Image (cartoon, coloured by chain):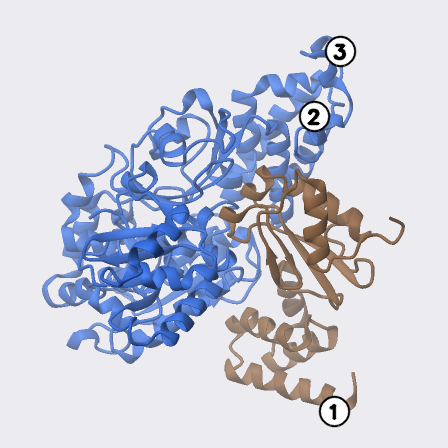
Amino acid sequence: MSVTTASAAAASLAQVVRRHGARSDALIEVLHQVQEIHGYLPPEALREVATLMRLPLSRVYGVASFYHLFRLEPPTDHRCAVCLGTACFVRGAAQLAQRLETRLGVDLDDAAGNGTWALQHVSCLGACGQAPVVVVDGVLLTKLPVDRREELESQLDAAGIPRPPTV
Amino acid sequence: MPVLQPETPSRQLRCCGASGCRSAGGEALLAALRTARDADAGAAAGLTIKPVGCLRLCGRGPLVACDGPEGTRLYGAVPPEHAADLLAAAREDGPDAGVARAALEPHRLDLDEPFFRLQRPVVLETCGQVDPESIDDAFAHGAYDQLRRVLAELTPKQVRDEVRRSGLRGRGGAGYPTGLKWDTVALQPPGPRTVVCNADEGDPGAFMDRSVLESDPHRLIEGMAIAAYAVGADHGYVYVRAEYPLAIERLRLALQQARRKGVLGRGIFDSEFSLAIEVRVGAGAYVCGEETALLLSIQGQRGMPRPRPPYPAQSGLWGAPTLINNVETFSAVPAILREGGDWYAAMGTEGSRGTKVFALSGAVRHTGLVEVPMGMPLRTVVEEMGGGVPDGSAVKAVQTGGPSGGCIPAEQLDTPVDYESLLSLGSMMGSGGMVVMGETTSMPVVARHFMRFSVNESCGKCVPCRAGTVQLAELLDRFVEHRAETADLERLEELCGMVRATSLCGLGQAAPNPVLSTLRWFRHEYEAALREPSHCEPPDSCTVGADGETRGYAP
């Protein structure tokens, strides 16, 4: 991060905290907004939040590490999320997750992924009527044909998910 | 009033703009309709194109309802190319109406189908009718009329009496009598009170509350305001899960509009009553649906449950008496006050009054949202309304209550849907998710699926839940991978009992339910998964690991 963007980020962070009047009950909201700025919650930003909100760092880190949606490591360039909600599960989501793991050469829920892609699970996207669903870089793929291998692969191709290099 | 049919049918096209239809291309269709209208300004005059909330049959999205004096026609899975046809079909007198309607015929959905016909909309009465982003449209549909009347005519006690008379019970899952809870909060020693709406709908397969928030947020706000008046609160919070961005956006907009119109704020409707409501967004923790965890999360802390008593009704947010109800409970209140508690109590069964919204999904032909009177047999909901399993095979089980509930076997489908009946089957009402499972779904695999969920979501505060769910998941692995021993079956049951009896909060106490209910109704599947050949029913089902994949689910 260059000096100017770093100071700009620090300034906007201070702004975020000020907007909430440094009320300690706004911590989760503040962390959401910090994550929006950086894409994740870098350690220096957590320290900054603790100082500005006059909270122990342990409290800030404790909250940041408790909630699943807060990321403590920088995200990969591309991300894929597979819904493992019950409706998707009944329609073959676990098989789909395995297929994506193989295809991307990553482990499910390993934030580091393969360096470029990471695959995570989500518990329910609420798109149960379109099950099974996958989100690729923010785009929702619906009603994926888990049973029809060829069709599934070509839909995943179209969504920009790379095939393993050896195949 | 039949579902989805407006009282005053003016010529209009209602497009579902809730998440389900959006994910199926609803926005593109709405844009195409507007473009087509603008291109054909003269002919389309007098025709309203209105974005609305959930039109129920989410699996056939995007949905469009076409209203006219002759009634309502519903179309599903409409591609944007049909925009011009929809416009023409909506203009009854247009020259191309007949042609357009013929072109749309394959997309037509029959409103006389049981899925629609058997619904009894109360909470959802204006869902799909009203534009969720317009408070004026909400006013036109009667929003805030009851708040106005209550403030002018009723004492807080009269309001609570009416709610008690309705027999309404908490729709979040536990089913605590709402009127009793309101009384408990109201009768605490003098001092500040708070109302909290639990919109942290975390059960996978449940999307009722999201649909209410996305479709008719003013109904929730009105219900909360009436509750706040009834218990003497002047401050409220809605705690919404972060996974529902559209619901959050619409709720925030609705609150802003309500403040601007003076239905929230100081001296509402020229009364002494004041109320401020804030939105709090979660950050992905299922346990925050538990009320004491939710309260801590609102206060910016880790959402970890604490022992009760004291109950939040006695000591909640910042130590003040706090009323917590979920979205559906609050949203039932305006209709109860309008029609009277007795009217509401006349629907449903002795112990479970009124209606309940369910989200139907899984191996079922019609996926979507249904609101039905309590006491309707599960079979009617799943087979008649839901249309059964898509390939025509038999229903194997219905999962209710999410990770805290259980699987109800096909032979028990004639059970009426009410709190007590579902409990007696080893499941629970839960918040209303209903996932249908066909013959291809293996029950030990389902049990492990939920146990993994609980492992992931355990907050870690108490050992039985933190360590017990991990041990249970590992035991279930053995069954799924066909390497379990007879003793594992005993261990599984014993550990389930321990986790249930000794966990601190509802999440841990209910985590064994999916295992216990599948053990109760599908024990043979666990026995067939034992390693010892003598216990194997068909010899080939002992093949290690292969079973899961060949039947369409991964081990």
User: How far across and how far down the image is residue A89, in percent?
Assistant: 60, 40
Is residue B232 at all visible to an observer of this figure?
A: yes
Residue B238's disc number: none
- Residue B165 lies, with reference to residue B37, above or below; the image says above
User: Between disc 3 and disc 2, whose residue precedes?
Assistant: 2
The residue carrying mark 1 is: A4
Total numbered circles? 3
Residue appearing at x 55%, y 64% in the figure: B301
Residue type highlighted by circle 3: Pro
Residue B149 location, quadrant: bottom left
Residue appearing at x 57%, y 82% in the figure: A16
The residue carrying mark 2 is: B479
Cα separation between marks 2 and 1? 57 Å
Residue appearing at x 17%, y 74% in the figure: B269
Dot 2 and dot 1 residues touching (CB under 8 Å)? no
Q: Nearer the viewer, residue A95 or B418?
A: A95
User: How far across and how far down the image is residue B433, in percent?
Assistant: 45, 42
Residue type highlighted by circle 2: Phe
Q: Nearer the viewer, residue B162 or B52?
A: B52
Residue B359 location, quadrant: top left
> Do discs 1 and 3 share a chain?
no
Chain with brown colouring: A
Chain with blue colouring: B
The residue carrying mark 3 is: B533
Classed neighbour count for the residue bearing mark 3: other residues with Cα under 10 Å, few (<14), some (14–19), many (≥20): some
